[in-house]
């Protein structure tokens, strides 16, 4: 496996990939239902929740849409501080909701006081927040934001996109007061893309039952009816679920605290390396991701050219996202990436840069 320092799809271990080659089972069979139930139970551990976790055959963007459709009849407040939080705002508007936003420049965090101010001005059924903004490397203070929401506007549900953080950084659904929390398979879970996992508590399910026009594919009430029978309304992505079952065992065998510490150590090492180069991180101190590091580069640095250099070493690096392309690069140290892999990347940087006068 050649390390890719890109924020998804990430490298997948060979033995995990091989799980997808298992023979098919009838998806209504007791054999498959047992696998499905195991996946839910193990997922609850990494979500830190006693609530249900839906296993959905779609991307994280589908989970964004599901939250909007199930939890708000009319009004949604979106916290926007990067490309993927902006997408969630767009999804809310595209579903006919009155979508308002708290917006800060890319590279900044959403602060609890911003949320408090917005909630004191108007009432919202749902607030959407991205935990780990993959475009900027900013990690929003979810626990503190949720505390503000529950204090200022207790009827507002808190939905959190943890697509690029869950299973790589600690986020506790129950203890932090999160009503709906989701991730997708292709980032810190280190699986192929195609699954979303979404934890939904009782409060949020009660809301969904009273929201009309939830659709069908993303209807949590319908999903819950089938989940209680260890099933789904539609044919699920069975091969991916075979791999999920196996990979969750690997994650839990590593130990969640150990896994979080590994990701955090690589974030600290990346920061120290960038500091030594005099290249600032985009995210401010105190709000930096544990799963990817976004570095502001001088204009003389050409990420595309560097990737040609890396390709000869079976490595790959992510350029900046959207408007940040060419201005930043992203070192994704998530999933299967190990500290020794990161050292290989940083050594390649140190070999390449002097030849470019950097």
Image (cartoon, helix red, strand yellow):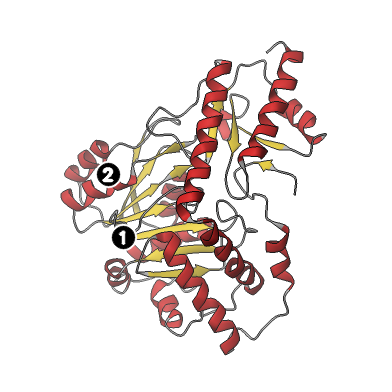
Residue 274 in the image: above or below residue 171: above
Identify which residue is drawn at 65% across, 32% down: 343
Residue 55: tell me if it is visible. yes
Label 1 environment density (alpha carbons within 10 Å; few <14, some 14–19, many ≥20):
some
Which of the 4 image quarters holds residue 199? bottom left
Residue 277 in the image: above or below residue 251: above
Identify which residue is drawn at 20% across, 47% down: 122
The residue tagged 1 is 174
Label 2 environment density (alpha carbons within 10 Å; few <14, some 14–19, many ≥20):
some
Earlier-in-chain disc, 2 versus 1: 2
Residue 294 in the image: above or below residue 152: above
Q: Is mark 2 on a helix, strand or loop?
A: helix
Which of the 4 image quarters holds residue 307? top right
Identify which residue is drawn at 64% across, 36% down: 342
Q: Which of 312 and 184 is in front in this view?
A: 312
The residue tagged 2 is 144
């Amino acid at each position: 496996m050649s390390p890719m320092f890109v924020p998804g799809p990430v490298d997948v271990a060979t033995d995990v990939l091989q799980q997808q080659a298992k023979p098919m089972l009838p998806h209504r069979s007791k054999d498959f239902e047992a696998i499905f139930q195991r996946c839910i139970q193990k997922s609850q551990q990494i979500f830190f929740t006693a609530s249900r976790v839906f296993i959905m055959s779609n991307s994280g963007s589908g989970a964004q849409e599901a939250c909007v459709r199930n939890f708000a009849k009319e009004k949604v407040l979106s916290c926007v501080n990067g490309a993927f939080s902006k997408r969630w705002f767009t999804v809310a508007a595209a579903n006919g909701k009155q979508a308002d936003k708290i917006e800060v420049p890319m590279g900044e965090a959403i602060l609890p006081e911003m949320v408090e101010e917005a909630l004191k001005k108007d009432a919202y059924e749902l607030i959407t927040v991205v935990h780990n903004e993959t475009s900027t490397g900013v990690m929003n203070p979810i626990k503190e934001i949720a505390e503000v929401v529950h204090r200022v506007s207790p009827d507002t549900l808190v939905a959190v996109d943890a697509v690029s953080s869950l299973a790589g950084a600690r986020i506790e659904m129950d203890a932090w007061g999160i009503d709906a929390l989701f991730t997708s398979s292709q980032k810190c879970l280190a699986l192929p893309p195609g699954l979303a996992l979404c934890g939904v508590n009782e409060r949020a399910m009660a809301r969904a039952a009273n929201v009309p026009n939830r659709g069908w594919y993303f209807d949590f009430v319908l999903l819950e009816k089938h989940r209680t029978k260890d099933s789904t309304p539609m044919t699920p992505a069975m091969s991916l679920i075979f791999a999920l079952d196996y990979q969750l065992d690997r994650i839990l065998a590593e130990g969640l605290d150990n896994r979080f510490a590994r990701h955090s150590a690589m974030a600290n090492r990346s920061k120290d390396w960038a500091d030594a180069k005099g290249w600032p991180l985009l995210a401010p101190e105190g709000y930096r991701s544990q799963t990817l590091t976004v570095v502001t580069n001088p204009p003389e640095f050409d990420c595309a050219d560097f990737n040609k250099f890396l390709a000869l070493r079976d490595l790959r690096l992510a350029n900046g996202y959207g408007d940040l392309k060419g201005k930043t690069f992203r070192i994704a140290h998530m999933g299967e990436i190990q500290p020794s892999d990161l050292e290989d990347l940083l050594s390649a940087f140190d070999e390449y840069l002097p030849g470019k006068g950097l």
